Amino acid sequence: MNVFGTIRHEVSALWAEGKGKALITIALGWGLLNGTRMIYPVLLPSISTEFDLTLTAAGFLVTLIWVSYAIGQVPGGVLADRYGERTVLLASVAIVTGALLVVVLAPTASLLFVGTALVGLGLSLYPVARITILSELYPDRIGRALGVTMATGDTGQTLLPLAAGVLVVGAWQIGLAFIIPLLVVVGLLLARMSLPATTHERSNDDLSLQRLTYVLGELRHPTLLTVGVLLFVYIGVLQTFSAFYPTYLINVKGFSPAAASGLFSVFFAVGIVAKPLAGVAYDAIGIRRSLPLVLGGAVVGFALLPVLDGFWPLALDTVLISTMLGSGAITQSYLSETIPPEIEGTGLGAIRSGASLLGSTGPVLFGAVAERGLFDTGYLLLAVLMGLVTLLTLRLPSDRSPDVA
């Protein structure tokens, strides 16, 4: 079978039995929510000017999104296990829509921070429900299906910050307000989405201490702990890089806001291709051989950032760094296959929440380093971290689905 024949076969398999419409709807929601989150770095210089924020305070604003995003993922997983994914996905979109209204209308920095925290909380409900529903819909193609939704997320992260970078010329509020009607449309699509019957029973347990102890006990397997560490470092590096890359390009490299937004969009544009390919690689060769392939480019890319100048050299380096975006499709596909089905949502939420919470400290720490004129040093430290986590992949088992029960 040639390449085009293979692509047609995979598309047909993903679309079969009415599942394709659900996949597209879920992916559209993820694209909008991911794009909304990544608009903040583009608007950060304008927001900082209006509210007189230091780089450290601006870093904390971005950290606040990630902290609230981390905190909500455990309850999001529990709610998905108990009430079903559709309810949780709808709640996520509704909360983000309301929170954006608070942000764009905020008259003070205090309300700006409150609204931003609510944005992160709303975002936190979507990812676990998205993963568990895809694992039910595509038990034999989870890497591919998750890669598609993640690629849509990167499409949102590519296009929406770019649009916001243009709209910010009028007012930074416009750069967020245009998302609100789009989220309303996605909410309506989610409400009408047709879903096949689930493949495992819903949990009727609350998040009691006994259940939490059971879940944590199931997650203590060394392999799951290793993947959790990998996810933590990846999330921390991604959050840190994305929070300040436009600011770095403007303040250190001398780029215009439009050019900086363009390069920032290039970073996520590569993910549109990288994530589906990473998902295919995971399905084909497993996590141990596929993960180092997507992490290695970022090690070199971060190390080169301080010594490169000019649009095209930095554009090529941005592409090199962006290969790391494929790691999410690999690690989260692995987790969805490995965690016991009866606690999949709660367990996945716990791992993602812990990793995101720890990783959320990155932007505020990086902001403090940058404020002391050490932007370049910060990127060298990111290169070291990515190098260490790439070596850590050697601790993973060679097979795809170790018994963790």
Image (cartoon, rainbow, N blue to C red):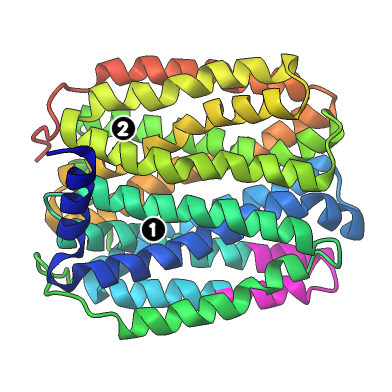
Kind of residue at disc 1: Pro
- Span colored in magenta: 97-116
Tell me the residue that label 1 is attached to.
127
Q: Secondary structure at mark 1?
A: helix
Q: Quadrant of residue 113?
A: bottom right
Kind of residue at disc 2: Val
In the rendered image, residue 400 lying in the magenta stretch gets the answer: no
Q: Quadrant of residue 285?
A: top left
Residue at x 90%, y 60% (from the top left corner): 50
Q: Position of residue 27 (x, y in %)?
A: 38, 62
Q: Position of residue 18 (x, y in %)?
A: 17, 73
Residue 51 visible to the viewer: yes
Residue at x 14%, y 66% (from the top left corner): 16
Classed neighbour count for the residue bearing mark 1: other residues with Cα under 10 Å, few (<14), some (14–19), many (≥20): many
Which numbered disc, 2 or 1, marks the residue that appears first in the sequence? 1
Q: Position of residue 98 (x, y in %)?
A: 60, 79
- Left/right of residue 328 with respect to residue 143 in the rendered view: right
Most prominent secondary structure in the magenta stretch? helix
- Left/right of residue 188 with respect to residue 209 in the rendered view: right
**Residue 191 vertical placement versus 205 (above, below):** below
